[in-house]
Image: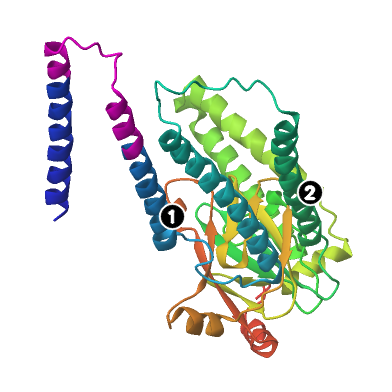
Amino acid sequence: MKLLILVSLFLGVLIAVQFLRISKYTAQLKDVSDADSSESDNKLHATLFALFGVGYLSIVIWMVSKYSLMFVRPSASEHGKTIDALLGFNWVLLAIAFFLVHGLLFFFVHKYVYSKERKAYFYSHNNTMEAIWTAVPALALSVIIIWGLVSWNEIMDKPKEDAVSLELYAKQFDWTARYPGADGKLGLTNYNVISNTNPLGIVTVQTVQSKLQELEEEIAGLRAELDSTRAQMSDYKIKKKESKIRHLVLHKNRVLQINLNDERLKWGEDDVLAKVEFHLPIDREVGFQFRSRDVIHSALMYDFRAQMNVVPGMATTFKYTPIISTADMRKHVGDAEFNYKLTCNKICGASHWNMTMDIVVESEQDFNTWLAQQKTFQN
């Protein structure tokens, strides 16, 4: 069917082109210049243009009603309702401007079609009209900017003291969620102590000592290898080995600068790590912290109208209050398998598509039960 439609469209265009060629040859036989056009030709073109305008605007209305992705699902966060309202207001303004301008364009072409009996009036200037089309856009933009700034300041304000604290850690190509343990504080982090058993770089006495031991063993192994095979190695390989040893020594010195007597090193021992999915309590504010190990990622939680860049070397923050549980949203969309999603909204590499994580919104009691069942970092 699609092939037949495409063939029909192609043949229609081909027929139209042939008709134009015929009309051109007819005009040449009648010795009529291309620049000349009769009053009937003008009226015909004006009518066709007006009909095209009606069809064009009708198709726009149909496409928006059929394919628009706006508000497919209601906002699952408190601040999202404000964002939806602001976005909706912008779309209303754009729609008014779009239909007004295009409607007048098609109307004027039809109404003021060329006539030999009528001469165009030269209208050089009108202060009232200038003031109107300057003031109206300025007023609309002022409303958008002020509304947007007020909303932004409210959304980006610091989380409440009783807000749930949660860190989302990104690396190619997955997410890890980290909650504070019984002490209510997220542990300190340092990229120098990242290892296979400590991918988030959480700093505790144990992780520092483990990293030092790992570095010392690697340095000792390289030095032993270099001493035993130096005679058989080229100068290039010797320099490469020595350079690696120097870098490892510098790494070890940076780890040694961590103060093991710092009481804050205990904060990370009871942190809770979650993969695959993380849970949030409904109607309670959640303060997010985002970190990245490697490249710039972007944490997008569409249903909560939340997005924040995740930047290596710094922590970014966001907050929101979930207001619709996963169970209620499943009923709303009529899909028992529906889940809220955390996705990466930056093309961060070959497996970017795979950076997703389920979000479960539930009652505070269920959330606390789930959190208590999770293993701590120390365990």
Report which quarter residue 188 is drawn in: bottom right
| Quarter of the image with the N terminus in it | bottom left
Q: Residue at x 65, y 87 (%)?
A: 363
Taking the image as shown, residue 357 lies to the left or right of residue 267, namely left
Q: Which residues are magenta?
A: 24-47
Establish if 376 lies above or below 357: below
Work out whether residue 199 can be spotted: no
Give amino acid for label 2: Leu
Q: Nearer the viewer, residue 339 or 174?
A: 339
**Residue where numbered disc 1 is placed:** 353
For image coordinates 77% across by 67% down, the residue present is: 186
Q: Position of residue 174 (x, y in %)?
A: 52, 59
Q: Please tell me whether residue 34 belongs to the stretch shown in magenta.
A: yes
Please give the name of the residue rendered at 79% of the width and 51% of the height, measured from the top-left corner: 146
Image colouring: rainbow
Q: Is residue 71 left or right of residue 14?
A: right
The residue singled out by tag 2 in the image is: 256
**Which quadrant would residue 75 be assigned to in this image?**
bottom right
Would you call the spot at circle 1 few (<14 residues within 10 Å), some (14-19), or many (20 or more)? Answer: some
Quadrant placement of the C terminus: bottom right
Q: CA distance from mark 1 to mark 2?
A: 39 Å
Comparing labels 1 and 2, the label whose residue is closer to the camera: 1
> Of callouts 1 and 2, which one flags the residue occurring earlier in the amino acid sequence?
2
**Three-letter amino acid code at disc 1?**
Trp
